[in-house]
Image (cartoon, grey):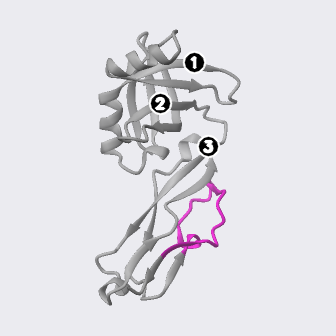
């Protein structure tokens, strides 16, 4: 599992005007939730650092483990719980982080990536690839969270599909999604 360091600052003020000024100064407002969700703390992160992280780990952000470091040097292990985007330009407006405890189970959406599309038989026959499911919800301990799942589609024929049951899921990870669902299909044009 990838771990990304992110510097944060605590913030005490809230409200539309303060948050707008915070965003204009190059920071993203965030909230750090306790594991049970009983309490939360208002923080902010540097927009450039967050956007760089999202570019480097494109499609895998939901399964990234963040090491949040505040201005006093305190460190917090967390996962992203929610991302709010602008509906106009898709800029990140707000992030919610969830603190991790090593002995407490977490539920996470893990991205599903397709491998072998260059050799895919159905695509060579003129078919089009349609990925139906892009994420699988799982439950496991924080140290066991996989960065992604991969499906090898190189042998997929025209008008055939693959189900989520074809994924290789470790024994210490419990899928919360029905594995009998179709994940990918090669359809006729």
* Residue identified by numbered label 2: 94
Q: Picture coordinates of residue 91 (x, y %)?
A: 37, 37
Residue 88 visible, this orientation: yes
Quick one: label 2 or label 1, which is nearer the N terminus?
1
> Over which residues does the magenta segment extend?
163-184
Q: Picture coordinates of residue 62 (x, y %)?
A: 49, 45
Query: Residue at left 67%, top 21%?
Result: 39
* Residue identified by numbered label 3: 141
- Identify the image quadrant of the N terminus: top left
Name the side, left or right, on which 41 lies relative to 17. Answer: right
**In the figure, residue 101 lies in which quadrant?**
top right
Q: Is residue 104 above or below residue 156?
A: above
Q: Which mark is residue 11?
A: none
Quick one: label 3 or label 2, which is nearer the N terminus?
2
Residue 74 visible, this orientation: no
Q: Secondary structure at mark 3?
A: loop
Query: Residue at left 32%, top 87%?
Result: 126
Q: Secondary structure at mark 1?
A: strand
Mark 2–mark 1 CB contact (< 8 Å): no
Q: CA distance from mark 3 to mark 2?
A: 26 Å
Magenta-span inclusion, residue 12: no
Q: Picture coordinates of residue 175 (x, y %)?
A: 64, 58
Q: Secondary structure at mark 2?
A: strand
Q: Is residue 17 above or below residue 106?
A: above
Mark 3–mark 2 CB contact (< 8 Å): no
* Residue identified by numbered label 1: 41
Q: Picture coordinates of residue 118 (x, y %)?
A: 28, 76
Name the side, left or right, on which 38 lies relative to 153. Answer: right
Q: CA distance from mark 2 to mark 1?
A: 14 Å
């Amino acid at each position: 599992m990838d771990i990304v360091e992110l510097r944060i600052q605590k913030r005490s003020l809230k409200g539309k005007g303060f948050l707008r000024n915070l965003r204009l100064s190059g920071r993203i407002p965030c909230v750090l939730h306790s594991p049970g969700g009983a309490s939360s703390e208002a923080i902010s992160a540097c927009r450039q650092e967050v956007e760089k992280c999202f570019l480097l780990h494109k499609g895998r952000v939901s399964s990234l483990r963040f090491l949040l470091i505040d201005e006093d040097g305190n460190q917090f292990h967390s996962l992203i719980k929610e991302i709010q985007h602008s509906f106009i330009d898709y800029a990140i407006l707000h992030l919610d982080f969830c603190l991790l405890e090593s002995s407490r189970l977490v539920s996470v959406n893990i991205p599903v990536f397709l491998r072998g599309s260059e050799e895919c038989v159905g695509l060579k026959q003129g078919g089009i690839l349609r990925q139906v499911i892009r994420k699988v919800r799982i439950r496991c301990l924080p140290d066991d969270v996989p960065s992604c799942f991969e499906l090898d589609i190189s042998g997929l024929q025209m008008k055939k599909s693959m189900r989520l049951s074809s994924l290789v899921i470790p024994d210490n990870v419990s899928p919360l999604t029905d594995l009998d669902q179709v994940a990918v299909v090669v359809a006729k044009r």
